[in-house]
Image (tube, coloured by chain):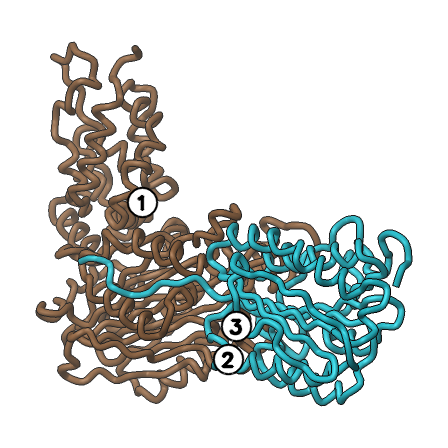
Amino acid sequence: MVNRWAAPIAASRAGAAHLRAGRPCQDAALCRELRDAEGQPVMLMAVADGHGGRRYRRSEVGSRLACETALAVVADALAAAPPGDGEGAWSRWLAHDLPEAVQCRWLEAVQDHWQSDPGEGDFEPLLYGSTLGLVVMTTLWWGHTGLGDWDLVRVEADGRARLLQEENEPTALGEATCSLCQPQAASLFARRAALHPLAPDPGDFALVLCTDGIRKSCATDSDFLTLAAWLAGSGAEAAGVLPEALDRISREGSGDDVTVAIGRAAAPGEPPVPLPAPPAAAETPVVTPSPAQAAQASLPRPRPQRRRPAIGRAVAIGLALAAAGAGWLALVWPRTQPPPQVAAPTSPGLRAALAEVERLCGQPASLPLELRRRRDLFVALRQGRQDPARLKAAAATDPLAALIAADLPAADPTEEKPAAAKLPAANPRRNLQALGACPALLEALSRQWTLSPATTP
Amino acid sequence: MPFPDVKLANRPLHFLYLCDCSGSMAASGKMQALNQAIRQSLPGMAAVARDNPEARVLVRAVRFADHAAWHIETPTPVDQLEWRDLQAGGITAMGEALKLVAAALQTPPMEVRALPPVLVLISDGQPTDDFAAGLEALLRVPWAQKAVRLAIALGHDADLEVLQRFIGTEPATAGRSPRRPLQASNATSLAQYIQWASTAVVGAASMPASRVSETPLEPAAGNIPLPDLPPTVLDPTDDVGPLVW
């Protein structure tokens, strides 16, 4: 069985009008590679648009929980039955079973959030109102479902694009849309759900899933389809340009939050995506995100450029380290730690670090700023005021700090000049390459190290 | 790969005045006060439009007396608008005005990607034609259902019941009274209401913010929540200045 799907990518940006009003991004996106019960890869992408205004003042949480809930529901279903078990059953699942589970779990999740962080007044789901658009891509079929004003476009290899899905509810017009917070939400999924079997040779195509901010930024639907084709066709380059492009779309268009997720069935001109290595026996067949991963959901995620998908790399690293009798921590921190216990690649720290590398490399333009905000940490590490081991051990909760700690240059005993004037003496950052760090990230880290004095001036 | 050659555009926000130009508007300077209030509100409306570049505020106006007709037919960017004075004379074909607006809110010509429009009905009397038929025609149009509908009653002869039917019913919520027509009894309060509609309401309507679509339980949930009235006129029945009209 051949996996036709590349790892999906997504980006979510606060709209120009929201930034001006000091409001957070109320959109969320999430892309994941899962495994079904037989170990086959399944790609998932989800977008959600939290409603605006005082009535929905926690919708940025609601949209994030919508994506996470959808992921958990899909993961559970795939763990119970492989996608080949009757397409009719999976069609019904997309239209009925999944919606009920999503709505039920989302309501539980938002209620839990309210209880952990109660606000003024009484709890009501309306506070967390959000749409949800979801695409599931298996080796045998792909399908979509959800509710609300998201759009789905299919782009062929020659650039032809057509709108597959839009909201057509008679009551949804202007800014009004269907929402997970409505009592009848589960019943609204069916008209947005469909399953598409994959032909033996489906050809190259891409799926572009986006929140309404993108289409409403385009003067015509023709412009929207052209834009979707460009987003899909920019391929690996999209990893770098996506956030910038979304900012422009919002700034020159609707001003709304903008989110896009892109799935690709074999990139144009490339062979089918190779099937990632099967999971190790000890691994859970289906990956469920850790809270740290979930927190990354609304951040831009790149399409790996000739890199193994994150899970595939984790598996590969884990298998390699297991064979060598050491865990990933040993690979990354050989100088500062004794050989630690073998850590499975599913450890939360590793997953968080991998996700962080992907996130950072997916937005190279913002790398300098992100790292500059951690200047104090660079300096503290250089001056020995921070313990790198402690930061690395806490990778699950602060993966960026762990990556910075892992990149700490070895002390140069011959160093006499201020560190700021010299490049790091050693080359420990090559360790981060094992996690797939891109050149832009390595360069940005080097830049910060050169600006961080080893001694107090 | 360079950004594609696509046209990105802000979203149209249609603002429509429906102005009563019946003969009674000539009395006590009501027509003059209305012309002046609208003219004076334009700079403020233009400023709000500049502050919300994602919305393209386009103004139109309908006059109704013996018949309804467009006073400004072409949707005009607010910064290019020059208000020509309305003239009073005739009876009150309000229902016909609503039908005229209903036709304009059909898609097309209304853009699918438009922001919910703002409709402001200003009247000092009672409709002399089939108001119910006009309202029914208007509310059959989805954009009219989603519109922000405001009504300003000029003086004590205005038919508050028909104006209430135009804006619809919205129950009282925490800290807020039920929506009612605004009642202006002199030029000062009229100017304040017009100013509020053309600035605060336009600002609220300009902000892209999705909402839950209507449900049987929340019939008004799909519309834009109105901003607060100016502190000086918090209660629409609490007039400012002397009773003139």
Instruction: Name the residue that disc number 2 marks.
Output: A188
Element on which disc 3 rests: strand
Looking at the rendering, in which quadrant would you find the N terminus of chain B? bottom left
Mark sitting earlier along the chain (2/1): 2
Instruction: Name the residue that disc number 3 marks.
Output: B74
B230 horizontally vs A77: left or right = right
Vertical comparison of A134 with A395: above or below: below
Instruction: Name the residue that disc number 1 marks.
Output: A349
Element on which disc 1 rests: helix
Q: Colour of chain A?
A: brown
Q: Badge 1: few (under 14), some or many (20 or more) residues near its Cα, within 10 Å?
A: many
Question: Amino acid under label 2?
Answer: Leu
Q: Mark 3 and mark 2: span between their CA atoms?
A: 39 Å
Q: Colour of chain B?
A: cyan
* Residue B107 vs residue A446, the one in the foreground: B107
The location of residue A67, given as percent across then percent down, is: 42, 63
